Image (spheres, rainbow, N blue to C red):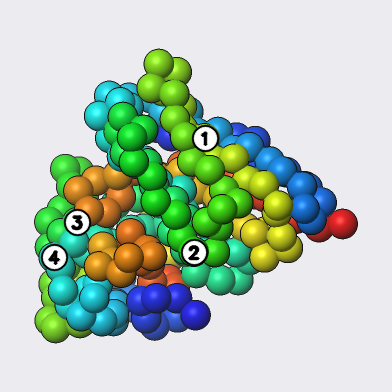
Amino acid sequence: QSALTQPASVSGSPGQSITISCTGTSSDVGGYNYVSWFQHHPGKAPKLMIYEVSNRPSGVPDRFSGSKSGNTASLTISGLQTEDEADYFCSSYSGSSTLAVVFGGGTKLTVL
Amino acid sequence: EVQVVESGGGLVQPGGSLRLSCEASGFTFRSYWMHWVRQAPGKGLVWVSRIKSDGSSTNYADSVKGRFTISRDNAKNTLYLQMNSLRAEDTAVYYCARGFGYNVDYWGQGILVTVSS
């Protein structure tokens, strides 16, 4: 059981938009604006797509956007492309004394 | 280009020890916190440990406290994780990640550690 809850899978057609949710608590997602999103192709290094809730690193297409409401953060990918098919996971700073960073269980995005 | 590359994984018996290394390049290693994160088969990612840029402060998840030791050699741009008293539940892919603010940004590809007799 991961600290942050994500749907196991989402799917969409090329050109469509999808949203992946990431639900935590007031001790992590809800309490701080330190939510990140990563794209992960199995066997490769995860790639940072969004940091601090809604900021995109240089080189990440503006089709990727992030937001947060209460204890739930969201990643939206608009204008889906076949190369977007991957696993996506969220992470958040945790105010817990035992864990510095907590993670979601990951969401498999299928582009049909 | 920022890169972190893990090494040192493999098969070890329960109760045994293993040392993971993470070689960094493409950034000023001595300026960043560094983290270890792991993912057991079929499970989600779990934060394991972190170390301050100068090595003066470390933190551990409760599950590894007292058994694992994180360290770094800034002259060699290398992060380490010494794992002792290994258990079957330590079986996982271990990732090295660079600290970024209160989170992480760049990750390695991961290295598999299998604890089994």
Q: Chain of mark 4?
A: A
Who's the residue at 45% across and 80% down the image? A8
* Secondary structure of residue under mark 4: loop
The residue mark sitting in front, 2 or 1, is 2
Task: Using the rendered view, name the quadrant where residue A38 is placed.
Answer: bottom left
- Residue that sits furthest to the right in the current view: B117
Q: Is residue B53 left or right of residue B108?
A: left
Q: Residue at x 35, y 50 (%)?
A: A47
Mark 2 residue crowding within 10 angstroms, few (<14) / some (14–19) / many (20+)? few
- Which residue shows up at 71% across the image and 43% down it? B17
- Residue ranking furthest to the top: B75
Q: Which residue is mark 1?
A: B80
Q: Amino acid at mark 1?
A: Tyr
Q: Chain of mark 2?
A: B
Circle number at residue A33: 4
* Residue linked to disc 2: B62
Mark 3–mark 2 Cα distance, whole angstroms, equals 26 Å
Q: Nearer the viewer, mark 4 or mark 2?
A: 2
